[in-house]
Structures are given as structure tokens and as C-alpha cells.
Image: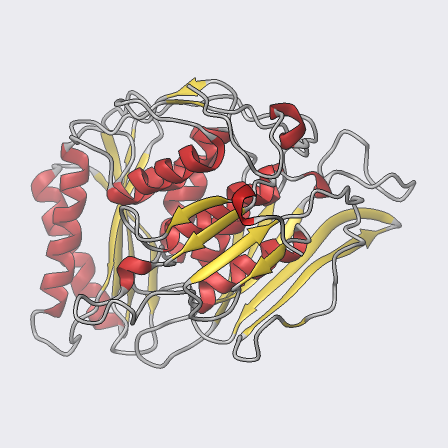
Amino acid sequence: MLSAESSLVHLEGTTLEGGGQLLRLALSLSSLTHVPVHIANIRGNRGSKSNPSKGGGLKPAHLAGTQWLGKVTAAETRGVEVRSREMTFHPSRKARNTRGENIQDDAKLLTNEQSTITTEVWKEVYEAGRLVRRDSRITMSTPGSIFLVLQAILPFILFSAPYAPIESSTATSADASIPVRITIEGGTNVTNSPSFEYIDQVLLPMLSAKVGLPPIGMNLHSRGWCHGRSEVGSVAVDITPLKPGCSLPAFSFTGRGEVIKIHVSILASGLATRSVIRDKVTEQVLKRHNQIEILFPVDEDSRDSRRLYLLLVAETSSGYRLGRDWLYDRKTSSPTAVDDLVSRVVDDLELELAHGGCVDEFLQDQLVVFQVLAEGRGLINLGKIKEASLHTRTVRWVAEKMIGVGFDDAGTCAGIAYKVGERYWERTGRKDGQINQQH
């Protein structure tokens, strides 16, 4: 049975942004700290004004991450099913061995016959009798966003004890982490979600170069699209968890520097269309940044005229990357489609650069979990922006409710110095999810 309701941290899912990011951070923090959480009105702000009850609740991408975290933490759960608008998540505090032997490895549909998600937990990979990697797979039958699933599970993978080496002569050295490969099937280019290109060119480089996490690699096996023909794709993500017992040092994003390069990624049907986009982007960028270096890391046929995507990434002299993109969601047959696409993305990037900060709007909220878990106080310089994005304010609120970490007006917080694999509730003296405010 689940613990008494009074022991849970209760979150109202319509708070601030009221979407999936609230859910993802709550589950990430619950999985690591073992603070149980109850979320009501999940994605409650996603319903229409005329029919608020329609459009919210768990979608397949939210369910995939929730189920995976539930299995690896042996969590007791309620309401973990598609379209559920209320759920409870209570990770087990029982000691787990590093092989995860109390976790089922067989792939099967979980908890609800309507679920389209199949999950597998860890499979150990050996070479010459030595454990070299742990593999896991998360599969969605529709192109739900792969990278929203990754957002939910990445902190747990990086900071969780089960990835410490096993006590065996076949394991690698005792002070090393076992690399992890997560293969996720779903959507790589999905409306209102980060694209493969954005994650590959902005998020992951910043996590390594500026946050201080081990490099994270990705291999695009195939693309998954929600536009045109619906297609499910596949991405393998290679992660090296932090060493057992260590914590992430505080980090700061300051001193952006000058823009020195613009990286342009184009996905469109046909060489002629892509050539027009290249020319128009080059013309508009050079009007604003005379003689800047323009690179084209991705110029790829989308294989469907209804798929049109553009990402621009500004690289600075201090190593920061800010990006803006658009998966075109209007009629691509319109004679103004290419002009609209290029003008909007170029203008959006210019707005990001004008504020002088070190991160774009879409990176802000993805750094909060690492600020919260780090040891010490760090700063994310947002530039002349008057306040953080709604997504960022939402996840800051979740962190305060879940583990008592507050943010000041400048967006800094004192992280909890989470040590990889620790029994966090013992360190803080919390019982059954009760929290003590930290200032």
C-alpha cells in the first residue's frame, strides 16, 4: 500500500505554466530524493478554455518517462495511465543492489491496457568478461517526443546509485561509473518539443562545457515525425553517470561574449527548397552580422513536403550556444512558407541575442534541476530579461515544494549538494516525504 496521503508532497498541476515540465521535474526529484509526490490536474492548463477537461492528462511521452522511473525506483504508483489527470508516485526506500535485481527486466505493457509504451530496464553488456555498459530501451508506438522523455530520466541516470559498479571480478574498477546507453523510440521532430538538432547542438554541449557533466553522446538511428506521414524514429543516448559519492559543483553562466558563428540546420523536402532556405538565411543573417561565419551542420531531405524545419544556433566567443527553431506548423504549400519560416527564426534568434544573457528561452528551465542538485550557489545570467520564462518559474516552484530549495530574484539558489547514490532522506532527517525549508 502507498503511504498515508498526508505524507505526500501535493502539487497542483495547473500552477503557472501548468504543463508537462512540472510533471517531469517532480518525478526526477522524487526518483532521486525518494520524496513521494501527488500531482492533481496533470497538464491542467493544456485544455481549451471552452472545454478545460479536454487536452490535459498524461500523454504517451509523459507516460513513458513515468513508467521507466517507476520501474527503476520500484515505485508504488496510482494513476499511471494515458489521459490520467491525477497520479501518485512513491519510490521505494528499500535498499537495491546495483544489479537492480528487484526490478523486472521483461518488456511488457504496464498498468493499463490502453498504454502504447513498452519499457525494458537494464541489460548488462560484457566484453571479454567485463561489464562495459548497461543498456535500456523505451519504446513508444507513436511519435511522442523522445527528448521530453529524456528530460524526465536524465537526472536520475546521472545521479543514481544503481549505476555504481557491481561488486564482482567481472566489473570495471570500483571508482568508475558504468556507462549507460538509453535507446528511445518516438518522435525526433515534434511540435512544441525540443528537436534532435536543438538537443544535439545546444543542450548537450552546454551541459558538458558549462554545467560540468560528462559528455553525452547521441546517435540518430532514424527520424520520428508528427508532420506529414506519422513516423516513429529512434535515438541512442550514451551517458556516463557521475561517480558514486560525488556531487556536481555549482556552476554559473556569465560573460556571454561576442557571437562568432551561426549554425544553420535545415530539414525540408527537395534540394531546391533547401537551397532557397540556405540563401535566404544567409542573406538575413549577414544583414545583421556582417562577415560572421555561417555553418550548415544539417542540410537534409525531410522526405515529405509537409515537413519543414529550421534551427539557428549562435555560438559565442565564450563558448555559449543560444538557439531558436521552428517546425513549421502551417500549410507548407503556401508560397510564403519559406519566407515565413526564415524570417521568424532569424527574428527570434535576434531577440535572444538582444537580451545579452547566456541562455535562450528554451534552455533556461532545463538547467534548473542541475542548479538544485549542485553543491553551492550558481548564477544563470538571463541578461536584460525582466523575469524568467514561465516554464522556468514553474520548475523553480516545483523544486521549492519538493525539496525546499528557493530561488532569489537573480535566479540563483543554494543547491542541495546531492551526492550520487545517497539516501537523501537520511541526510536531511525527512520522514515519509516531509520537507524542511532551506534558505
Residue 260 placement (x, y as % from top left): 25, 32
**Seen in the image, is 309 located left or right of residue 331?**
right
Q: Nearer the viewer, residue 170 or 378?
A: 378
Q: Quadrant of the C terminus?
A: top left
**Seen in the image, is 23 located left or right of residue 172?**
left
Up/down of 122 relative to 130, above or below: below
Residue 140 placement (x, y as % from top left): 52, 71
Visual colour scheme: secondary structure
Q: Could you tell me how many numbered marks the image carries? A: 0
Q: Nearer the viewer, residue 46 or 243?
A: 46
The quadrant holding residue 275 is: bottom left
Q: Nearer the viewer, residue 426 or 259?
A: 426
Q: Quadrant of the N terminus?
A: bottom right
The quadrant holding residue 321 is: top left
Residue 93 placement (x, y as % from top left): 70, 42
Up/down of 81 relative to 396, above or below: below
Up/down of 436 relative to 266, above or below: above
Residue 313 visible in the snapshot: no
Residue 421 visible in the snapshot: yes
Residue at 14% x, 66% y: name it: 338
The quadrant holding residue 360 is: top left
Up/down of 394 relative to 41, above or below: above
Residue at 45% x, 75% y: name it: 142
Q: Nearer the viewer, residue 321 or 207?
A: 207
Residue at 26% x, 71% y: name it: 271
Residue at 49% x, 59% y: name it: 87
Residue 344 placement (x, y as % from top left): 13, 55
